[in-house]
Amino acid sequence: MNVEIICPLYNAEKYLKNLDSSLKKQKNVNISKISYILTESKDNTKNILDSITKEYSVVQPEEFSHSLTRETVALKSNSDIIVFITQDIEIRTEDWLEKLILPIISRESEASFSRQLTKYDNIEKYIREKNYPNNSYIISKNDIEKMGLRAFFFSDASSAIRTDIFKKLNGYDGKRLPTNEDQYIAYKLLMNNYKIKYCSDSVVYHSHKFSLKELYKRYYATGVFYKQENYIDKFGTTKTGGSLALYILKRAIQDKNWKVLIRFLPDMGVRFIGMKMGKCNGRK
């Protein structure tokens, strides 16, 4: 089965060369196309991209949408499998892609996503531990009642989906989602009796150091998403967030990670307030 990799780019000069090189080093996979989508940037991204390929699409900043920008390219794909990635992942092995798409090839599932690790010893470290365990699993519609919102956890920082299924489901339905487009498609997959596999052996590094202001903006956007798609919110965002916060606190205490413990309350507070404000102010 052949694969098309779809990757939006914005101010990506510090990532692009290494990312492209790591994609081209993947073994035992037929990559038919790497589709970069360039949003007009303020750095040297375009010049670097021009040195790599002349075949890429361009969107203006005001036209970019996490859902619609990806969807536009994906719906035109002639590949068997679509792989979505983000510009800031770090791929350290040559079998990341092979292990990501294997469940789709073997018909275990119609979609899959990778394990994410971080290189920083911050709150994100414990979030990654909780969200990306070292054991693989498959999720189906039958798991929703038990797992609640957790069933729809799916990250397009590194994910794969059968192209025919993506098209059959009409992708993101032409919506300009502010964020959580991956959760949106996961909901549609499970509700239509398709399966998703979490592949713990397909590993990427995805590392951030967000300021409190940046966290607020991210969680505000997430709140807007749940306001717009309130049928997903009914599965329990507050319960899921509370469970994650308790896990972070427990693990930071175990590790005597004072940096995380000092940051814990303002960090969790900003996430909670951002989410609530987004839900209050977002449009349905």
Image: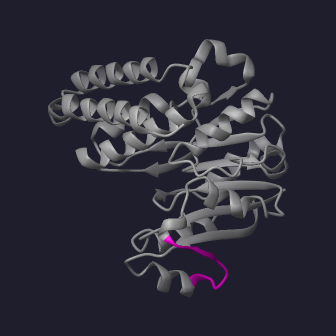
The quarter of the rendered structure image containing the N terminus is: bottom right
Give the answer, above or below, for where 209 lies relative to 7.
Answer: above
- Seen at 48% across and 86% down, the residue is 47
Report whether residue 9 is seen.
no
Kindly indicate the quadrant of the structure image that contains residue 186. top right
Q: Residue most toward the top?
A: 146
Report the residue at 59% width, 63% height from top.
7
Drawn side of residue 118 relative to residue 40, left or right: left
Foreground of the two, 164 or 196: 164
Q: Position of residue 98 (x, y in %)?
A: 70, 52
Q: Residue at x 37, y 77 (%)?
A: 42
**Residue 233 rendering spot, x and y as whole percentages:** 53, 25
Instruction: Place residue 198 in its image quadrant.
Output: top right
Residue range corresponding to the magenta coloring: 52-60
Residue 94 locus on image (x, y percent): 61, 59
Residue 102 shows up from this direction? yes
Judge whether 112 appears above or below 30 on screen. above
